[in-house]
Amino acid sequence: MAIVGPGAAPTRTSALGPAAPVVDRTPADDRRPTRWTVGRILLTVVLVGFAALFLYPLVWLISASLKPASQVFDNSLVPETWRWDNYVQVWAELPLLSWMFNSVSIALIAAVAVSVSSSLVAFGFAYFRFPGRNILFGLVLGTMMLPGSVTMIPTYLIWKETGLLGTWVPLFGVNLFGSAFYIFLQRQFYLGLPRELFEAARIDGASYWQLFWRIAMPLSLPSFIIVFLFEFQAAWNNFQGALIYLNGESVEDFTAPLGIAYAMTKYSPSAGGQGDYQYVMVASLLVTLPMLLLFSFGQRYFIEGVATQGRKG
């Protein structure tokens, strides 16, 4: 029972006698209002400035997409003449739906392929112990030191001999064999898992595939999603690969980055166009939105992955 007297702190009594007064253990920081010191104000100003700096290109793009052709490059963030019909006419001017479908399909296949293949290889390096494992892993990491310009021509010749030029396969085929960076990233996650879990599962009769699929994969889901998002973005923005392997085919077969480059040439006055760059701005904005939504969805997995690595350290 609590006994409270005038001006006295509340106490509790028991069979052994009165206990110590009840103390309010609410942290003092929770009861104090935020103090805006000079350092905090400067930090806020710097952060707001960098946020505005990074948001400016997006705001400019949105503004340019709502202008007529004569005002696209006037550098004004508020259009003098609002042209909402640009978002309707762009579908008739450009095969944008086909470009986005091609990009989404290729990016999904590429992301799934490299995520699964890299996870399998990473699990092998993390779980199995065999002679020369570290040397072999070092050779895998060594492939990251090769510039893409060195392997571009040999890779092109390989796909040419297979007769797959002009198809989607060269844009995701190499992902079937994993990526050195993703293998390294996911191996670090697997090394942080308790080995006793796998040993107990082996005693219960689990196969190596079950160790990977039922234990390693669920526990390292943040790393898998991070790899998937990274590769999806890389495949979505892969202009060079589409230019090499798809250029010269039907315009409807282009990916979104290659299609936007085609639109820039189509509307260029030097190439006989009318300078209708507002359609290019609309297409660029519509192509950017899926990436913004995707990374908004995967933001918590990025944070979880960083936090997991921090706890391991």
Image (cartoon, helix red, strand yellow):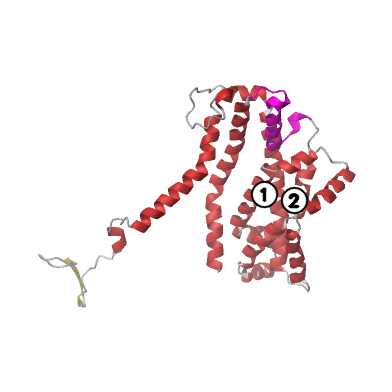
The numbered disc on residue 299 is none
Q: Amino acid at mark 2?
A: Asn
Which of these two is toward me, 15 or 270? 270
For the residue carrying disc 2, how many other residues have a C-alpha within 10 Å: few (<14), some (14-19), or many (20+)? Answer: many
Which quadrant, please, contains the C terminus?
bottom right
Which residue is farthest left? Answer: 6
Seen from the viewer's position, the closer of residues 100 and 79 is 79
Q: Disc 2 to disc 1, how far (Cα)?
A: 9 Å
* Picture layout, residue 15 above or below residue 32: below
Is 264 within the magenta? yes
- Left or right: 241 as drawn, with respect to 225: right
**Residue depicted at 44% across the width and 51% down the height:** 47
**Residue hosting label 1:** 231
| Place of residue 225 in the rendered image (x, y in percent of width and height, measured from the top left) | 61, 52
> Residue beneath label 2, please?
175
In this rendering, would 160 be left or right of 50? Answer: right
The residue nearer to you, when weighing 179 against 12, is 179
- Report the magenta residues as a range: 250-275
Image-quadrant location for residue 138: bottom right
